[in-house]
Image (tube, rainbow, N blue to C red):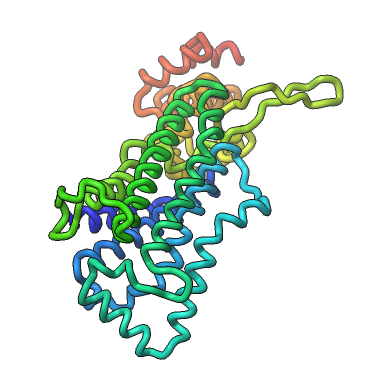
Amino acid sequence: MIIVLLLSSIFGFVLSSTLLLKGTTNTIATRILGCFYLLLSLYALHTYIYDGGYLEHFQWFFLWPLLLYNFIFIPIYYYFKVVLTDRLNWHKAELILFIPLLLGLVDVVYIYLQPASVYNSILSETISSPETRLSAQYLLLRLDQHLLIRHCWQLGVLLLLLPKIKFFITHGEADAMKSILNKWLLVFWGILMLMAILAIFYALEKMALVKVFDSLIIVGEKGGIITFFLYIALFIIGVIPIYFPSILYGYPQRARTTSNGNKDVKINGLKFGLDEEGMNLKLEKIKQNKLYLKKNFNLTECARVLQMPSHHISYFLKQQYEVSFAEYKNGLRMEYAEKLIRDGYLENNTIEALAQECGFVSRTSFSKTFKSHVEISPSEYALAVK
């Protein structure tokens, strides 16, 4: 069962690489989410090495990760905050988020400042008895106490975010992309909440403060049902984005305003979509380079050129211009065809040549598209221009 942790780590590393390196629509949100999955991957790998008894072969992976793990819920908080408000800002009250990190910093620095024998003693004890590793005492706290505080903070952060998530879901325009995001936020929040609760019970069990289903041994000789479900929760968090691929690119929201004299009045509610100005600048790149004239210029190729997901392009065109990508591309081609005809292209060339010049593979498809846009055939348009 412990192999689940290794799989979770692998999925997490792949996902974090995608989020941190790939071009996105909402850079801040996706980068923060990438940081969370990077920390989660290290967390799962670290637990796999410890609980699997492999620390002897990876001694360099000891002690210092405590600092990173006490940081793990901070990306969670700011990811939700950026998605829900479409901006990243800072409040002094948020300093409370860093208390577990500060406690971890003190304890880690303390151990590293001690004689090497102290560090080696803790390491040897952890290697020989991995099931009791959480009872190791540092300066301020034991490891199980660090674990408990860390996930109590995570639980508090998620409870604090719940009203804001509820407000976000129940307000704004109900379009397809927001519907997907609503489901993702609920599922992601729910799994993180489950992870926090299970980790708290796990820490309490290690501290011998509570016993939950103590007789149900599932993971190894000492692993109970809480350990089992904690492993499963980590695995689900690592793989759940597979079912929500579109959320990996973020969906910024923007407030709608309407002009009232010299004042801009904000409408109560948020229009959920992509930044119109930024998207139009991207699409202008297509026009300037006349990429739409390429025969193989499809939605996938357009997404590659613009470095953004194809479904975002389709969504924007439908939302702003009420056209599909094919209609948008053919509209540009027809504008170009009309310009060529007005410039006398057909005086020295055939309609077949014009179709090829405009990116069509045949005269038939070109003529059919031209007539649907201009309402007359290319030859009739040429005569009308004369």
Looking at the image, residue 248 lies above or below residue 170:
below
At horizontal 52% and vertical 19% (from top left) the residue drawn is: 322
At horizontal 60% and vertical 22% (from top left) the residue drawn is: 342
Q: Position of residue 292 (x, y in %)?
A: 47, 34
The C terminus: image quadrant? top right
Q: Nearer the viewer, residue 285 or 270?
A: 270
**Residue 341 relative to residue 294: left or right:** right
Res. 59 image quadrant: bottom left
Confirm whether residue 220 shows in the render.
yes
At horizontal 45% and vertical 26% (from top left) the residue drawn is: 179
Looking at the image, residue 101 lies above or below residue 264:
below
Q: Position of residue 61 (x, y in %)?
A: 33, 73
Q: Position of residue 337 (x, y in %)?
A: 52, 25
Res. 270 image quadrant: top right
**Residue 131 relative to residue 193: left or right:** left
Number of numbered markers: 0
At horizontal 23% and vertical 76% (from top left) the residue drawn is: 127
**Residue 56 relative to residue 306: left or right:** left
Res. 62 image quadrant: bottom left
Q: Nearer the viewer, residue 213 or 345?
A: 213
Q: Position of residue 233 (x, y in %)?
A: 30, 46
